[in-house]
Amino acid sequence: MRGWVAEKLVNISGHKNYDQMEKHYLKSIEKNPDSATDHAQYARFLKRHREDLDKAEKHYLRAIELEPDNTEWLTQYSKILSYDRSSSVEALPFVERAVVSDPTYSTALLEHARIHIYYTEKYELAEKSLNAAFEAENDCAYYWFLRGKLAFHWKKDYLEAEKHYLQALKHDATYDWALEDLAYIYHTVKLGFDEARSMYKRRLAISEDNVWVLQNYAILLSSQLGEKKLAAEFYLKAIALAPDDVELRLMCAQFFDGYAEERASAEGHYEKALELAPDNVDVLCEFADYQFRFKVDYSCAKQLFEKAIALEPSSIKVVGAFAAFASVRLRDYALAGKLYRQLVELPDKEYQSHLEFAYFLKNCMKDYEGAASQLLLADSIDPGNCTARVQYAHLLTGRLKRTEEAEQIFDELSEKHSDDAEFQCSYGIFHGFYKRDQASAEVFFHRAIELDESCSYCVSNYAYFLHRYKRDYVEAELYYRKDLEIEPDSMFSESMLAGLLFLLGRPVEGESGMKRAFALMQRNIRLEYRLSLLFCSYAHWVVEDNAMKVLREIKRVLPDLRGEECHSLDLDVEVATAAGHPAPKFLAKLAKVLEGEAEVSELNAFAEWRELGE
């Protein structure tokens, strides 16, 4: 008992003379080398006051050797293995021995439940231990936290988990683990974003030293609450705590990449992620995407893609991203074709791979039959997904002039996909854009928006139908604006709305919209959208320097417009001419070229084009 007496006396005196305490423990063990109690108490002292885990383990093991059924010592040694050595699997046999030795010892029962919840996933055993611990521990926050964990992981019963976590917080309002898990449930499961914010704030008020909490709160602020400035603060706090975490660095880079006001700062995070993990293909591909989209450095982007594909030549993500880059940015159709063929020949090729190859064949190579074959292959992989089938029907109508066959496909799909908003919208496009059946188109567009009023695809296409085909300009403006609420970075809706505002005689607003559309232009890979915007700018925004700059850009990229021509530009020509455009005949001819109804060479007849030079 010398060790126990030593600790008591020192504690009572108020002097933490650990050297003196240790001497008493050692003397006690020297006098009673087979005293399990002395070894266990010295082990506890070593862990608690000396942080000497190696010696503590040695003395706990000696105590257990001397008294193999001592529940407390078995449990305390298991905690060293679990928490200090991060080896809960090795700890489990000692906890199991503790529970067998004393089935009512709640500390061992809770530890037994924790290990089975977190590591072995033997949830029935965890529940049995928690039930046995109920009488002793039901007023303990940790007990209710484990109950919540069990419900969350085993039963996937998030309402029950929420109830238990809230019970834990009743016992301890600052219980950080319960706050973290509740925040996660509200954020990602129940989609209660205000409740999630409240839990994150309560957790962070305790301390801001948890990277997981900081990054998830940043995600909530950015993605769900639209508070990017505040989100940036929390991303940077997380980075400060874990500057060498590659996944966090990449997440931070992607956030700043999507935050227009701070996009330039993304580069430093991409570079740091690449420095930390030079062979990480996710980092390579994301940084390549940033380089060509924001920095417009195609050479650097190509090098990054080439390294990524050398590391993982069979990665669908890498091959697909490189193929898209080669096609829409480099305009290297030979390289793109090679990569797309590689993509669809991969052993684990996907539905999406054939869709992307079909898009390339249709829009870049004008190989409509080849595109049709790829769409049918995609449909054979996943016949329940109607996307490929719908694209095939649009191809039949717009390029292969087999409208009756296309309509038959839409009719066959209509009943099965009556609750699919995007399918209903596509059927509206078919009737409105191709068959010029406005009444039927209205029915399908309305049905699509009723099914999903937050679908940008449905809202933007209906706005375009109202604008270009029905010529209901008031309603068209409302729907373009609605789409920009859904998708603030939509260059299509921004530029179409700008053109519409010129048509409505509101040029000041039109110019403002044009400026916003140009700011988004570098991020849009659809060349026909870019050219439509440039044409709209030349038609309505007639400032001399701007006009020349825009025409030069049109002339530069026009040779790459293959297959997917611009939408009808007749309204822009009509409005600009009526407003006194200085070159109405040239404007009309340029529109026909962009629409695919005239050859580029016909523009040489106009001085406006010739003066641009080669």
Image (cartoon, rainbow, N blue to C red):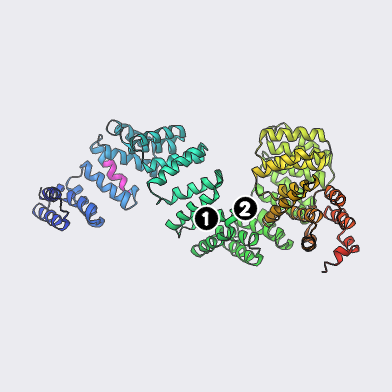
Residue 285, percent across and down?
Answer: 59, 59
Residue 162, percent across and down?
Answer: 43, 34
Residue 135, percent across and down?
Answer: 28, 30
For image coordinates 28% across by 47% down, the residue present is 78
Q: Amino acid at mark 2?
A: Pro
Question: Element type at marker 2?
Answer: loop
Disc 2 marks which residue?
347
533 relative position to 88: left or right: right
Quarter location, residue 53: bottom left
299 relative position to 277: left or right: right
For image coordinates 82% across by 66% down, the residue present is 612
Quarter location, residue 543: bottom right
Q: Quadrant of the C terminus?
A: bottom right
Disc 1 marks which residue?
252
Checking the image for residue 188, the label placed there is none
Sequence-wise first label, 2 or 1: 1
| Residue 422 located within the stretch drawn in magenta | no
Q: From the viewer's perspective, is the residue at label 2 or at label 1 nearer?
A: 1
Residue range highlighted in magenta: 90-97
Residue sitting at the far left: 31
Quarter location, residue 295: bottom right
| Residue 96 located within the stretch drawn in magenta | yes
341 w.r.t. 152: above or below = below
Question: Element type at marker 1?
Answer: helix
412 w.r.t. 290: above or below = above
Query: Is the residue marked by circle 1 packed among few (<14), some (14-19), or many (20+) residues within 10 Å?
Result: many
Q: Amino acid at mark 1?
A: Cys
